[in-house]
Image (cartoon, grey):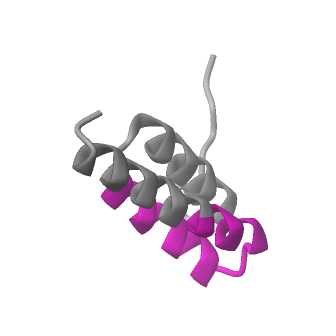
Amino acid sequence: VMVNSNKNLPEYNNAMGILMLMKGDYESSKKYLKFAEQSGLDAARSNLEELVRKKANAAKMKKNGK
């Protein structure tokens, strides 16, 4: 199966940002989501907000030794 993907599409970058977020790769997630947001994809903005929450939770858990 051949998939034609355009890595410049905001939707692609948003999806990759979500995938990286789920994997815990927050830096890569931020890069993808920022690119999608700058391309005008509104959904990327809410995903960036989710990224901030996830990073804060991860930092809090690390601080508490969990």
Query: Looking at the image, can residue 9 be seen?
Result: no
Q: Residue at x 61, y 57 (%)?
A: 14
Does 59 lie within the magenta span? Answer: no
Question: Quick check: 35 left or right of 12?
Answer: left
Question: Quick check: 7 left or right of 3?
Answer: left
Q: Quadrant of the N terminus?
A: top right
Position in image of residue 31 (x %, y %): 40, 67
User: Quick check: 53 above or below 19?
Assistant: below
The quarter of the displayed image where residue 13 is located: bottom right
Q: Residue furthest top?
A: 1
Q: Which residues are magenta?
A: 26-49
Question: Quick check: 43 left or right of 62?
Answer: right
Q: Residue at x 57, y 48 (%)?
A: 18
User: Quick check: 29 above or below 39?
Assistant: above
Position in image of residue 66 (x %, y %): 29, 33
Q: Residue at x 61, y 24 (%)?
A: 2
Magenta stretch, main secondary structure class: helix
